[in-house]
Image (spheres, rainbow, N blue to C red):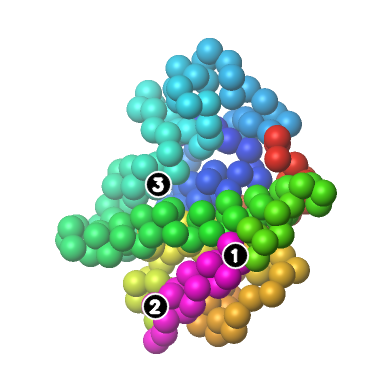
Amino acid sequence: MLTIYGRKSSFNLQKVMWLVGELGIAHKHIELGGSFGGLDTPEFLAMNPHGRVPVIDDSGIIVWESHAILRYLAAKYGSETPFWPTNPAERAKADQWMDWSQTSLQPAFLVGVFWGWYRTPEAQRNLAAVDKALEQTGRCLKHIDRQLNGKSFMLGEHLSLADIPIGTHLYRYLNLDLPRPNLPNVERWYERLQSSPAYREHVCRPFDELYGRLDF
């Protein structure tokens, strides 16, 4: 049995749960982190010494870090599907967007905007830094908008690992009352993602509990 650890409002857990839903993997989910606590116990630190979620235990195989988990699950449960094609060159197309998401989009939006503005108490916000991060986020989304031109999903007509780390940002990005550029292809992509029950269940979740909470 696959066991998944992490709170449902965790951005990085949502990536994992979305893929688990798309692949229909039988699993058990244990809420940890935030108000659930449990990240500093000896049992959890034995699985992940960094004390962070998500973590999976797949019948004794422990994996932490969300993108490592995505690749592991796709390789084991999604072989010969668009999530794990047999051709290494095709897998590399998804890898490069996954890595770009983690090194470019996530620092700009999740750290700079979502943490810097939404999760930071109003009196502590650095608005100049937030404005810069919002501009960087807009540039990142314009790259994605160009990539999506003429495509249903990031790499073509099928959902892939390239969509998951980037697509997980969209629900929060498009539901914050902040200015954003015109992104017609991204908005059409978001509509397609919302047609997925797994996306709606695991990504389109309220995040009010995180407002003004740096320590959650």
Percent position of residue 30, x then y: 59, 31
**Which secondary structure type mostly characterizes the magenta part of the structure?**
helix
Q: Secondary structure at mark 3?
A: helix
Three-letter amino acid code at disc 1? Lys
Q: Would residue 74 appear left or right of 55 to someone viewing this image?
A: left
Q: Secondary structure at mark 2?
A: helix
Percent position of residue 49, x then y: 45, 22
Q: Would residue 5 appear left or right of 73 to someone viewing this image?
A: right
Given residues 184 and 82, the one toward you in this image is 184
What's the residue at 51%, 54% (across, down)?
A: 107
Number of the label disc, if any, that sits on residue 67: 3
Would residue 110 be visible to someone looking at this image? yes
Given residues 89 and 210, the one toward you in this image is 210
Q: Which residues are magenta?
A: 132-150
Which part of the image, by quadrant, shows the C terminus?
A: top right
Q: Which residue is mark 2?
A: 147
Task: Say if 141 sits above or below 164 in the image.
Answer: below
What's the residue at 45%, 74% (across, down)?
A: 144
Task: Say if 182 sits above or below 7 in the image.
Answer: below
What's the residue at 39%, 28% (across, down)?
A: 62
How packed is label 2: few (under 14 Cα within 10 Å), some, or many (20 or more)? Answer: some
- Is residue 135 inside the magenta stretch? yes
Three-letter amino acid code at disc 2? Gln
Q: What's the CA distance linking mark 2 and mark 1? A: 23 Å
Number of the label disc, if any, that sits on residue 132: 1
What's the residue at 74%, 52% (across, down)?
A: 125
Percent position of residue 37, x then y: 67, 25
Q: Secondary structure at mark 1?
A: helix
Percent position of residue 122, x then y: 81, 51
How packed is label 1: few (under 14 Cα within 10 Å), some, or many (20 or more)? Answer: some
Labels 1 and 3: the sequence-earlier one: 3
Q: What's the CA distance linking mark 1 and mark 3? A: 26 Å
